[in-house]
Image: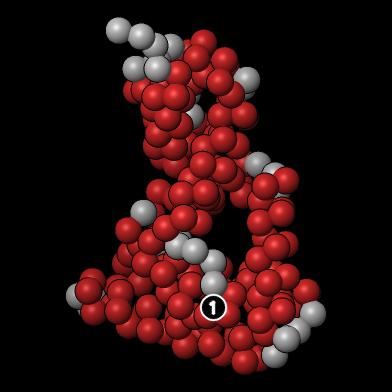
Amino acid sequence: MSYDSAATRARLLDSAYAEFADRGFAGARVNRIASESGANKQAIYLYFASKEGLFDAVLEDRLGVLADIVPYTPDDLTGYIGALFDHMVEHPELVRLTQWKQLERPDATDMELNSHVSKAEALARAMGVDDTRGMDALMLTLAMAQAWNTTSPSVRYMSKPAELRLGQHRASLISGVAAVVDALQ
């Protein structure tokens, strides 16, 4: 049986995603990632050079997957934010990963910076505003989309059935996004 480096790299990314989302950068252990992936610790350093390189690769990989699943539509920001919200509700570990990133490694990578700037510029063109207003709209609506996952369940449900509250919150999110766009135009 031959060694499949692409499969090993993919397993490492999957294991690292679970580890980093659960424990953050500081709490994650390279030995645990290697063990969970069925690879050895040296493979991590071979493919990613360092724990930092692995974290950055995981973040880039997962944000790339997100971009494929939820394509950015600056001409339909409410539709995009609604689809993004739906994905984050189904995959709360992605929100946790990005929260750990902000807490432990707050500087934006080149990929993150380029992604946000290009999205803000496209949104600014769609809204007919300058780039700073486009960035404000992007930042505000992304934060709104994450609010459900970043609020304690006991607070967000308010003693109502989960399905009811989730639908109510999603409707409020869409209304809020529309209001942000209207206010910034």
Question: Disc 1 residue type?
Answer: Leu
Residue at left offset 45%, top offset 66%: 84
Residue at left offset 70%, top offset 63%: 118
* Image height of 35 relative to 11, above or below: above
Toward the front, the furthest residue is 2
Q: Residues within 10 Å of mark 1 (few under 14, many from 20)?
A: many
Q: Nearer the viewer, residue 59 or 61?
A: 61
Residue at left offset 44%, top offset 24%: 6
Q: Is residue 123 left or right of residue 27?
A: right
- For the image, the number of numbered tags is 1
Toward the left, the furthest residue is 161
x and y, in percent, of residue 27 in the image: 50, 31
Q: Quadrant of residue 157?
A: bottom left
* Image height of 180 relative to 100, above or below: below
* Image height of 57 relative to 162, above or below: above
| Mark 1 element type | helix
Residue 2, can we see it?
yes
